[in-house]
Image: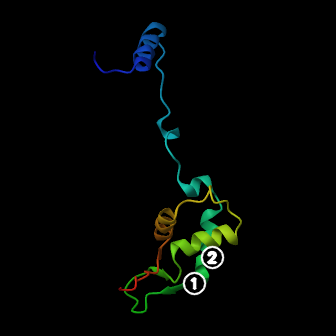
Amino acid sequence: MLGWNRQSVQLGLDERRTGIVCVDNYQARGRHKSIEILPNLESDIRSLVDAKVQTDPKFQSTFLYARISARAVREALLGEKGYDQSELPSRQTLGTILNGLGYRLKKHKKPSP
């Protein structure tokens, strides 16, 4: 009638009966970051990308521009570093990781028809 879950109601009744308050572990929920799951991923990405970076030619920013795409980084991690297809994050997530590490990715222009 109130829209509450049966398990939540039972938990509340049990807490009231015993006097012990159950604390939930919210931090353990959800998907963890790829860098937390794969501790060597950051160093492997840096070793692949550092050979193919350049600074801003006009020195207007401190970012390093990578002359490699996120797709190429993912393929190199699969081929050279021996990662499994299922454990690696997607291309978009690798792009986010690369941006977080201070790299700006190469933009591929689509040819006009």
Look at the image and tell me in which quarter the N terminus lies: top left
Q: Crowdedness of circle 1 by 10 Å Cα count: few (<14), some, many (20+)?
A: few
Which residue lies under the disc numbered 1?
52
> Which numbered dot is residue 36?
none
Query: Is residue 7 shown above or below 109?
Result: above
Q: Residue at x 60, y 59 (%)?
A: 88
Do residues under tags 2 and 1 come within 8 Å of each other at their CB atoms? yes
Q: Which of the 4 image quadrants contains residue 84? A: bottom right
Q: Residue at x 43, y 92 (%)?
A: 57
Amino acid tagged 1 = Lys
Foreground residue, 66 or 72? 72
Q: Is residue 36 left or right of 65 when viewed as pictured?
A: right
Q: Is residue 113 left or right of 46 when viewed as pictured?
A: left
Amino acid tagged 2 = Leu
Which residue lies under the disc numbered 2?
48
Instruction: Point out residue 41 in the picture as x, y percentages from the top left corner.
Output: 62, 63
Secondary structure, mark 1, is: helix
Q: Residue at x 55, y 59 (%)?
A: 89
Instruction: Point out residue 70 in the picture as x, y percentages from the top left corner.
Output: 52, 72
Instruction: Point out residue 53 in the picture as x, y percentages from the top left corner.
Output: 54, 84
